[in-house]
Image (cartoon, rainbow, N blue to C red):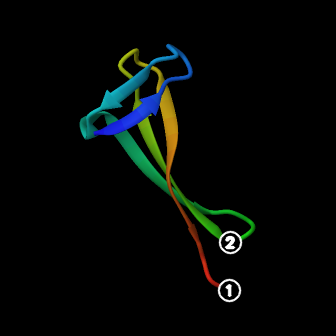
Amino acid sequence: MIVIVCSVCDRRSLLPLSMVTGLTRWVALDGEVIHELNYTCWCGAPGVKVVQRVRTPR
């Protein structure tokens, strides 16, 4: 379960992992690794939540 705040219906909801549609990993210009969780809210709107931020050593 994950907690989200939908920007469309403006509700704070608890979503099961079955409503997660994907996970994206990318590296910012400053070397920070960012993981984003893509989900679908109960109202049907898609959304993204940053689930982890890790600073890579240089």
As rendered, which of 26 and 8 lies closer to the eye? 8
Rendered residue at 42%/51% (across/down): 23
Residue 19 lies, with reference to residue 53, above or below; the image says above
Q: Secondary structure at mark 1?
A: loop
Rendered residue at 50%/42% (across/down): 49
Quarter holding residue 38? top left
The amino acid sitting under disc 2 is Gly
Query: Mark 2 to mark 1: distance in Å?
Result: 8 Å
Residue receiving disc 2: 31
Residue 37 position within the rendered picture, expressed as x and y whole percent measured from the top left: 45, 46
As rendered, which of 23 and 58 lies closer to the eye? 58
Q: Which mark is residue 58?
A: 1
Query: Dot 1 surroundings within 10 Å: few (below 14), some, or many (20 or more)?
Result: few
Q: Which mark is residue 7?
A: none
- In which quadrant is the N terminus drawn? top left
Rendered residue at 56%/22% (across/down): 7
Residue 48 position within the rendered picture, expressed as x and y whole percent measured from the top left: 51, 38
Which of pointers 2 and 1 lies earlier in the amino acid sequence?
2
